[in-house]
Image: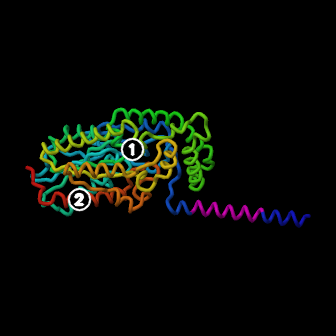
């Protein structure tokens, strides 16, 4: 009997020792891979962001309840954009100016300003001087949750002062269309309010319960994975949450057939783009468009497919890209399709894991593509301004 107890104890000790070694190896491996300590963003994070001229803040993510991917110090310029300040007058005669319009992908709060695609593009233009100009300036006008209506307003406000040679609009083939529709945008805001009130508190509480050793990479990774699965299926665990509380109206862009209201959103988007093109023509600037899809449309759509099965039917994840490509072709506007290159590079390399915006590597890819596109399109037509 004593021998049996001794053997059982020895076996248990061996199991515990093996498990301990495995846990330590996992912890060490994640640290060697520079896996960040897992932190979930709290509701008060929004109070720290000030989108106003000259503001400075640490940007850690857009929505509370997401896991932190980065901690970037953002400084906005005198107009409230994530860029340097540029004078209305050209510093030297004949300087080349490119204005970039867009939403959060142009604002790029997730990375230092020198890592943004527009500053990388500016640096390369200056270094290689493809248009034989004394100076190159790439001026970014972009803010989160701002689509073509706001971009048109910025162009009308700042265009006459900056007098750009060219205007590049980075079109996000995702929520840009929704944000151009007051009705659909209102639905999205209602969804965000419900999500903040129901899902986010439950998600944070569940993570805190599982995060037994704060600072542990392995423990945080396991808690993060379990919390993500829990939140995606919260309607199965809580009678206070319905499937509708987990389904963003933005998925309607990909639904087949389209739900009511979306066709009007497409039409308004086309009208706004036409107004931007006309404004560029009045400014004497060449209008260019680059199309970008997020990770949900180029390889990270498993959850969206699952969620949509009961609510939206089949998904057409390429619809946004095809639409903007067709619009630019019909309007005779030069178009750069960024999605294939980003997809080939791998969504996990070019997008942050939780935030879904571009990493520094993603910005580098966009900058390289934008440089080749601009040089090819504008060569021979980049006339100098005084």
CA distance separating discs 2 and 1: 28 Å
Side of 146 where 275 appears, left or right: left
Q: Earlier in the sequence, mark 2 or mark 1?
A: 1
SS class of the residue under badge 2?
Answer: helix
The N terminus - image quarter: bottom right
Membership of 182 in magenta stretch: no
Specify the principal SS of the magenta part: helix
State the image coordinates of residue 161 (x, y, percent, origin top left). Answer: 15, 41
Q: Which residue is mark 1?
A: 253
Q: Residues within 10 Å of mark 1 (few under 14, many from 20)?
A: many
SS class of the residue under badge 1?
Answer: helix
The residue most toward the right is: 1
Membership of 24 in magenta stretch: yes
Q: Which residue is mark 2?
A: 373
What span is in magenta? Answer: 12-28
Note whether 116 is above or below 188 in the view shown. Answer: below
């Amino acid at each position: 009997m004593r021998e049996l107890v001794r053997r059982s104890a020895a076996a248990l000790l061996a199991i515990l020792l093996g498990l301990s070694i495995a846990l330590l190896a996992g912890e060490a491996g994640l640290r060697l891979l520079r896996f960040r300590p897992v932190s979930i963003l709290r509701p008060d994070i929004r109070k720290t962001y000030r989108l106003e001229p000259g503001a400075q803040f640490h940007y850690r993510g857009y929505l509370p309840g997401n896991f932190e991917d980065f901690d970037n110090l953002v400084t906005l310029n005198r107009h409230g954009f994530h860029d340097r300040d540029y004078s209305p007058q050209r510093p030297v005669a004949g300087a080349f100016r490119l204005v970039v319009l867009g939403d959060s992908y142009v604002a790029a709060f997730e990375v230092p300003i020198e890592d943004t695609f527009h500053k990388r593009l500016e640096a390369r233009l200056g270094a290689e001087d493809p248009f034989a100009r004394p100076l190159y300036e790439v001026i970014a006008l972009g803010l989160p949750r701002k689509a073509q209506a706001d971009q048109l307003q910025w162009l009308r406000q700042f265009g006459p002062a900056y007098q750009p040679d060219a205007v590049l609009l980075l079109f996000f083939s995702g929520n840009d269309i929704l944000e151009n529709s007051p009705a659909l945008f209102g639905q999205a805001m209602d969804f965000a309010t419900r999500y903040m009130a129901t899902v986010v508190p439950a998600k944070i509480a569940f993570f805190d319960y599982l995060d037994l050793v704060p600072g542990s990479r392995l423990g945080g990774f396991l808690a993060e994975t379990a919390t993500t699965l829990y939140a995606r299926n919260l309607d199965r665990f809580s009678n206070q949450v319905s499937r509708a509380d987990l389904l963003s109206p933005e998925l309607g862009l990909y639904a087949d057939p389209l739900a009511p209201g979306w066709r009007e959103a497409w039409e308004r988007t086309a009208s706004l783009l036409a107004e931007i093109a006309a404004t560029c023509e009045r400014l004497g600037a060449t209008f260019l468009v680059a199309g970008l899809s997020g990770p949900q449309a180029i390889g990270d759509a498993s959850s969206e497919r699952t969620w949509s099965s009961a609510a939206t039917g089949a998904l057409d994840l390429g619809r946004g890209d095809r639409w903007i490509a067709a619009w630019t072709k019909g309007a005779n506007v030069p178009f750069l399709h960024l999605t294939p290159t980003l997809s080939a590079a791998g969504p996990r390399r070019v997008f942050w894991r939780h935030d879904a915006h571009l990493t520094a590597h993603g910005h580098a890819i966009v900058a390289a593509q934008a440089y080749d596109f601009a040089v090819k399109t504008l060569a021979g037509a980049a006339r100098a301004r005084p």
